[in-house]
Amino acid sequence: MGIAISSWQLARSVASQGQLGVVSSTAIDLVMVRTLQLGDPGGDMRRALAAFPDQALTKKIMDRYFIEGGKAADQTYAAKPMIGDKPNRFTEQLIMVSNFCEVYLAKEGHDGMVGINCLHKIQTPILAGIFGAMLAGVDVVIVGAGIPIEIPKVIDGLTRGEPVAFSVHVHGATKGADHKLSFDPRGIMAEDIIPPKRPLFFPIVSSVTLATVMVKKSGGIVDGLIIEEPSAGGHNAPPRGKTQYNEIGEPQYGPRDQVNLEAIKALGIPFYLAGSYATPQKLAAALAAGAAGVQLGTVFAFTDESGLRDDLKRDTIQECLHGKPNIYKDPVASPTGFPFQVLTVPDSLSEKEVYEDRCRVCDLGYLREAYEKENGSLGWRCRSEPIDIFVKKGGNIEETEGRKCLCNSLMANIGMGQLRKQKDEDGMIEELPLVTCGDDISTVSILATVEKPHYTATEVLDYMLARS
């Protein structure tokens, strides 16, 4: 779920009650360094860093980013390196350590299972991130938003402590060119360490074709499948075939986008259903269809334990209790080109005039795409960066229309938005949020009430499993 919405606190609560708790790997290195700059309230990050096997490395990170008592309210966050196809060793170390810390904290104090979710669209941090999570004993690696066909081999290689690589998608690549991202776990710490175990691998897929490819042609073990339907929050797979739009500009899904669960069952792999399954009735229907379970996101995003800002939780819950939240499947908001579910929130980037008033800037770079330069090397660009810069890098100006900066807005969602100069004004303003959720948010109004307008992860599980 986004950046740190599926936090270690939430994952730990879910995992400690016998279910699979999942943390998000997306931009978790940025979350770590900004947490340290805020003074690490409560000391949890420092406790996790103290458990990392290379204390010289964690001291280096602490010396660079930790601010005792936290940065001043008017002080901007210090930058961290953006990652490309040839990251320096410290950039890889930040990614490795941050993923370790998130999994370590999620697994602390119980024997339940913890997974980590990576976006295949964000390719550059995946290798070091998976290795860091494996060092902390992650139980399941989940990869979606793309075709992660090489990830099983990556996991197998990292389990042995070997160098790994996989192909990077390159826009406009020369025919026959094979650009690779690589990671060598040897020498990244003071002593080479083999992860304690091989985690399970669950790819997120949206069609029988992709599920079949993953199971039969990935060259490694696929332990389970997550079948995600278009009503799920965040990024969705585009409709199959030529995209049609409704009267408000949302991409329309049809019969070709419905997954044949009998064909999925025939693959002989456990599968889980995702997308509007947050009721006991939907869970029962999924089990009756042969699923091993369901994956829930939206209903957990508004729990007390999630990383979403308290005011965004509170206002959304009130909207659920007293109105009907407006959710728009935006075909262009994400620079990835994937449809992105947007919840309408006042004074957020979901509002056109607010979005247009923001100065375009790309200083985090997680959703940049690789492109091939004339000399055959790779460059990086983002459809949400300043338009003239994107065009100068060979991008088409039409691809910039309506694109929003998800990296900065999703950090604002968790209260870690960067301070910026206001457009055509003096003073500074914090980056504004952009909230995502699934189509079916109705369960929120079942779990929250006017008298108690909040709820916990435990209450979600009690409701779903009919626990008294």
Image: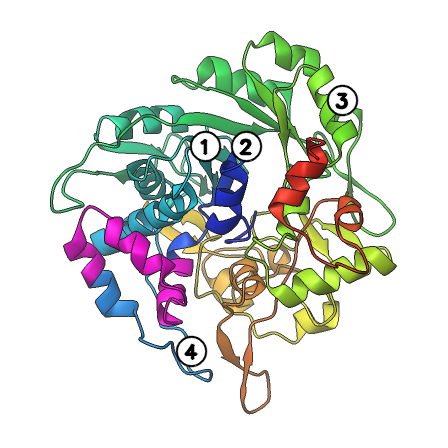
Q: Residues within 10 Å of mark 4 (few under 14, many from 20)?
A: some
On the image, the x and y values in percent for residue 122 come to: 46, 45
The chosen color scheme is rainbow
Q: Quadrant of residue 285?
A: top right
Q: Earlier in the sequence, mark 1 or mark 3?
A: 1
Which amino acid, mark 2?
A: Gln
Residue depth check, mark 4 versus mark 1: number of the one nearer the observer? 1
Q: Give x and y (percent) for residue 63.
A: 22, 68
- Asked whether 131 or 197 is in front, the reply is 197
Secondary structure of the residue carrying tag 3 is helix
Query: What amino acid type is highlighted by mark number 3?
Result: Ala
Asked if 456 appears above or below 277 in the picture, the reply is below
Q: Nearer the observer, disc 4 or disc 3?
A: 3
- The answer to whether residue 37 is magenta is yes
- Viewer-nearest of labels 4 and 2? 2
Residue in front for this viewpoint, 301 or 218: 301
Q: Position of residue 256 (x, y in %)?
A: 75, 24
